Every structure is written in structure tokens, then in C-alpha cells.
Amino acid sequence: MIILLLLVRIMVFALGAYLVFRACLSALRTFVLPRSAPDRFNRTTFIVVRQLFEWRSKRLQTYDERDRAMELYAPVALIALLVVWLFSINLGYIAMDWAIDAQSWYVAFKISGSSLLTLGFALVDNFPTAVLVFSEATIGLILIALLIAYLPTIYAAFSSASPTILTLLQPTRLASRGRSLRLRWTKWPRRPCLSKPTASRRGAISWAGASTTIPCYSPSPSL
């Protein structure tokens, strides 16, 4: 019986550690990796949020109403992704706290939540659990810091591209502005490449790498 209980605790600890590892790997692929990489956390979260927004927009009639309904899709999906990461890390550390300290699930939940949110109201009195508490608090702070650090990068990249996008979305001005946009592109001054994103095997580039890249422009035949 004791051996069986020990095996159960080892399996629970391993599952919790794997869940924490997958959540941290997803955050690294999203914010730090300078190229695109498939990730199940990201894909599942964005698909679920997209389906919720599409279910709402299907009831709307005009394009303007659907556009207003979908305008919050990307911000909500990004916040939802952070919530999924925090929940996965919390759940993984609950399993590891229970496996090490052999306390109830409620006590493990309090220890994990207090550590992840850096509240500090749950106290521990043994070394293995203290190591888990410090590591969980560190991971939580790093995730929040990564999100806060990259939000200005995302909005700066969007702001620099929005004038051209708005011009292309206006059909009445597209024909008259097409030649000027083409001439503006061909007459862009040459500059050396300061940074180049690394393309994945599928040829895609992650938003983090693309938003911090200064491209190289080469001359092309004018109209």
C-alpha cells in the first residue's frame, strides 16, 4: 500500500512538472523565440476565443457591426492565453505540492495560488515545498513581465503599418494611391539590415521577430 501511494505521488509530481514545462515553453515560443513555432496552447486558446467571437458576429447583419464585434478578438485572445498559462502553472504546482508535502488538495491549492500571485499568505515549513514556492513565484513574475514588455512592441508595429492598411482598405482611393505607394516603395532609401528574423521550415515569421526587424530595401523598376 505504501509503495502504491509512493508511485501515485511520483506520477502526480511528474504530470504537474510536465504541465508547468509545457506552459513555460508555450510562453517562450510566443514572446521570446524569434521565429514561428507551432504550439498547442496558443492554437487551442485562439481557436476557442475565435469561435466565441464568430458565434456573436453571426447574428449581426452589416459589416460595421461585425467589425465592432471582432475588434476585441486579438486583445481578448492574448489575455486569455495569459490566463491559460497561469492556470496551467497553478494546476501543475498544485500537483507537485500535494505530491511532496502529502497535504490535502485544498492546502496545496492555497500554497500554489499564494506563490503564483505573490500574495504570501500561505506559509510552508519544509525545504522541498519552499523551493517550489520560490520557483512558482519567479515564473509568475516572468510571465507578467514578458506580457507587459511586448505589448508596446505590438502596438508600435501596428501603428506604423496602420496608415498603409487603411489606404488599401478604401477601394475608391486604391486606384489613385496605387502608383504613389509603388513609387514610395521603390524610392525608399537603402539601409543595411540591422536584424533579420529567422524563418521557420514553413516559411513563416513570428510577430515578435517581425515587429523588431528593420528590412532591407532594394531598388526595383519604377512604373
Image (cartoon, helix red, strand yellow):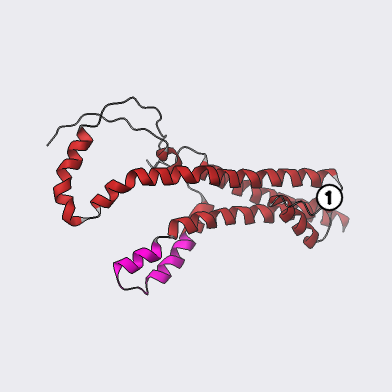
Query: Percent x, y for residue 130?
Result: 80, 45
Q: Is residue 200 visible?
A: no
Determine if the magenta segment contains residue 121: no
Q: Report the residue at 58% width, 56% height from top.
A: 83
In the rendered view, does 39 fall on the left or right side of 13?
left
User: Amino acid type of disc 1?
Assistant: Val
**Please, is residue 9 above or below residue 128 in the view?**
below
> Start and end of the magenta stretch?
47-70
Q: Report the residue at 44% width, 45% height from top.
A: 154
Query: Percent x, y for residue 39?
Result: 51, 49
Determine if the magenta segment contains residue 69: yes
Quarter of the picture containing the C terminus is top left
Q: Is residue 80 visible?
A: yes
In the rendered view, does 33 fall on the left or right side of 118?
left
Q: Residues within 10 Å of mark 1 (few under 14, many from 20)?
A: few
Q: Quadrant of residue 1?
A: bottom right
**Please, is residue 131 above or below residue 56 in the view?**
above
Q: Report the residue at 64% width, 51% height from top.
A: 19
Count the marks: 1
Query: Percent x, y for residue 137?
Result: 70, 46
The residue tagged 1 is 124
Q: Which element type, helix, strand or loop, lies under badge 1? A: loop
Which one is nearer the viewer's eye here, 69 or 91? 69
**Please, is residue 156 above or below residue 109 in the view?**
above
